[in-house]
Amino acid sequence: MPYTVLKHCLSEEWNAKDFLETHFSHGDVYHTEDSTVQPLKRLHELFSSGLVEGDIMLESSAGGMVSPLFSASKYFKEIYVMEFTDASVNHFKQWLENSDEATDWSYPAQLVSGLEGNEDGWKEKEEQARRAVKKVFKYDLLDCNSKNSVAIPEVDCVLTVYQFNIICQTKEDFKHNMKILTSRLKVGGCLVFFHALNMTFYQAGRHKFSSLALDEKIIEKVLNDLSLDMVKKEIIPAVKEHENADYTAVLFAVARKAK
């Protein structure tokens, strides 16, 4: 069946499980190295290094993605999850509740457990992540006056993996949503950020969806405007071209909130 015209993640055709299983959840995805392996390796290295520390994290990753929590939950006692669509909130809660409808995250759980030296402990790794999640919030992209974010306590770290690739349609959207996401970040706290660069579309199931194409210079300027000082930056080249998304590289960045 031919692809439909590009849509946005707020359209009714967007399905969180289709999205996650197209890109992230298992080793059969042929760009797994880009979408899952490299980000999880870097999160493991980052948190174990002590560069980013604290007790409370706000996590917001694309489509209700769970895998970033497997490293984070070892180091942060409380994790609050912010999603931007009902579909993502509901699908994330299915995983929290061990529903049969949830996406299978055993592959990345095994990967992180292996990085930590205990590959056989992956089931406990998932339970550790579940215990760390204290609440799941929705921020309404269509309501610029939404106050949901103020219900989240101030946090030591904000972690977001590919979320801004799917929610933003303009550069103004990017800056506005980044401001919202980092508004609860304590002074001295860190934003940990992964973004697929120059991506114009991605596939979820049989549909194609739009993505705002940004390069690292635009992103760095937005972070600087929001008083977020870059302390770590890495450009990870795409392993190979593929039909599910057209990014050229992945930006991995850590930025500290200035006084």
Image: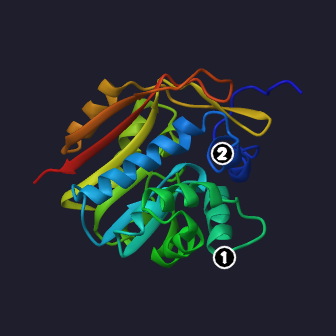
Q: Quadrant of the C terminus?
A: bottom left
The x, y position of residue 153, in whole percent, is 33, 72
Location of residue 104 by image quarter: bottom right
In the rendered structure, find residue 27 and report the number of the disc placed on it. 2
The x, y position of residue 205, in whole percent, is 77, 40
State left or right for residue 178 relative to residue 100: left
Q: Residues within 10 Å of mark 1 (few under 14, many from 20)?
A: few
What residue lies at 42% left-to-right and 26% top-to-bottom?
214
The x, y position of residue 242, in whole percent, is 64, 24
What residue lies at 40% left-to-right and 63% top-to-bottom?
72
What residue lies at 80% left-to-right and 26% top-to-bottom?
3
Distance between the alpha carbons at the discs numbered 2 and 1: 23 Å
The x, y position of residue 93, in whole percent, is 63, 69
State left or right for residue 209 relative to residue 175: right
Q: Residues within 10 Å of mark 2 (few under 14, many from 20)?
A: some
In the rendered structure, find residue 97 and report the number of the disc placed on it. 1
From this view, report whether residue 124 is shown above or below residue 247. Answer: below
State left or right for residue 168 relative to residue 233: right
How many numbered discs, if any? 2
State left or right for residue 98 relative to residue 255: right
